[in-house]
Amino acid sequence: MADTTIRLTTAQAMIRYLVAQYTEIDGVKIRVCGGGFGIFGHGNVPCLGEALYDHKDVLPLYRGQNEQGMGFAAAAYAKYHLRRKFMFCTASAGPGTANLLTAAALCHANRLPMLMLCGDTFLTRLPDPVLQQLEHFGNPALGLNDGFQAVSRYWDRITHPAQVIQSLPAALATLLDPADCGPAFIALPQDVQGWIYDYPLSFFEPKVHRIRQQMPDARELTDAIAALKSAKRPAIIAGGGVQYAGAVKELTEFSEAANIPVIETIAGRANMLDEHALNIGPVGVTGSDSGNWVAERADVILSVGSRLQDFTTGSWTAFAQDAQFISLNTARHDAGKHCALPLVGDAKLGLQALMAEMGDYTAPAGWTSEAQAERGKWDAYVAENVKPGNRPNSYAQAIGIVNALCDPRDRVVAAAGGLPAEVTANWRTLDIGTVDVEFGFSCMGYEIAGAWGARIAQSEVEPAQDTIVFTGDGSYMLMNSDIYSSVLTGKKLIVLVLDNGGFAVINKLQNNTGNVSFNNLIADCPTVDAPFSVDFVAHAAAMGAHSEKVANPAELAEAFKRAKAADKTSVIVMDVDPHNGWTAQGHTWWEVGTPQVSEHASIRDAHADWESSRSKQRRGV
């Protein structure tokens, strides 16, 4: 009689299970876990490292430089693959694992899958206290890994090898669920990793997972259709969930059939081509005058795949007080926000169902024509805004140069600071799904590390295309070591470092709220003895990248051409003006806390001015 079990360690069983899990993308069966990012230490190298070594050919392990960067890379990898594939991250016990907290929070906020396999203290407690253990005197079971419960969609600690049979499939179900998608954390005590168990062979049989597509409830669909048909000034908000659902085609067809203007969120920035007649532009705090014109006047708004965060809604001042929201979303939590008519379900199926029942309804031609005229005005503003020589070196000029020279399928990555706003406002989408602006968690340091992960994913599908990074000097200083990672692994990046001498966008906010410049720009730090500029060119070269500094946008254009032709990572540095280079239009009100009392008249005046827009804020929950 054939054996029905196999004796494995906990770590061996986990990796063998991951290797056997597949999904289908465009009819092709592929391994759902693309591999992992790892830094070994005493908490994971003896057992988990041994298991990974035996599967290194099918589950590649990329050596990271910093655990936080590994998590960012995993997030960008999953985003590129539209959440249909994921990477794991493994860290040792203690500070290595702690470094993943920020990345886990980023994945949680952005609803991105990442599996964390992290070392833990010994279950037996015989050697306690061990290296890097946090001791809680009244609760010996509590440790650092418990902190991940706040930033994980699924969390577990393996206390017996048999537990893997239940825990790992549950984690995988979370990673692939369109409504609950997010990071999964599994704590692995160092002794349990090496303990053995007779696992059923059936547990390791290949399995194909399919992403759930849920049809909206018939009654919710009826309510949504009735609201849309009543609209005199309808609008569609296109969020990042449109791409995750594979609903770009359906979004376009629905908007065209009903002649409804479309405005995009930051996450949904590449749902429609820039030249599409119904693409009226981005909406919100970092939006466009045209997109915000539509938002302010629309009476019925269909939100598709958006969590409607404050940068989209202008802290809920961008829309009319009596506007009716319909929210098509896989997540019930998002679908019911701000008294929206919920339409819980898959965006692709939901848009198909709406289109089938809308009959011959079309938005009034005058409404759509006005929206398109506003978009024409915005296009003229952007064309002037990105023009070289129109003012001192600016983010917008650099964005315009790259936009004009890149390939339509090149991928653009940006994150926290001023660049998300500038890319969102000024970038012309050349092809679907080519823009990754991480503003869900607005996390400095994502840019280069995330681009490395995106490039790994991109090389699996579009190896001839480039991954282009826009980063400021502040984010570069926070996390830059994955330039070295990209060189080591042959995953070419083009990194634009736009140096404005510190945290210039927060300095701008500081000034806009009546405060004097303080501790943001290097020149305004009272504890700095002698301000000087970092030699980013020499630094990047030391990590193996091609690097050069340019003086102006014209030189940037030539350097970018050289970077496109290069065979490895290139870093291009250009100084930009911290005060006079910002995109001045396209904004809505954004709620920030300002002092209600102050000895400074400028702060009192700014507070009064800020609060003057609060009357526009919707009071929905």
Image (tube, grey):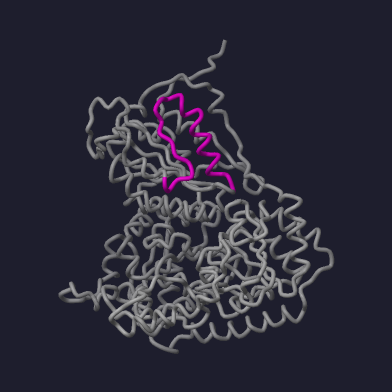
Look at the picture and state if 413 lies above or below 321. Answer: above
Viewer-proximal residue, 613 or 585? 613
Q: Is residue 426 visible?
A: no
Q: Is 506 contained in the magenta span?
A: no
- Name the residue rendered at 42%, 25% in the picture: 161
Look at the picture and state if 473 lies above or below 116. Answer: below
Q: Is residue 530 left or right of residue 521?
A: left
Residue 554 at x, y percent in the picture: 42, 83
Residue 63 at x, y percent in the picture: 35, 47
- Name the residue rendered at 57%, 39% in the picture: 22
- Quadrant in the picture for residue 342: bottom right
Magenta-colored span = 150-178
Tell which residue pokes out farthest to the left in this image. 529
Residue 83 at x, y percent in the picture: 55, 50
- Quadrant in the picture for residue 186: top left
- Name the residue rendered at 43%, 41% in the picture: 185
Q: Is residue 474 visible?
A: yes
| Quadrant where the image shows the N terminus | top right
- Name the residue rendered at 30%, 36% in the picture: 43
Look at the picture and state if 290 lies above or below 93. Answer: below
Residue 31 at x, y percent in the picture: 55, 41
Q: Is 176 contained in the magenta span?
A: yes
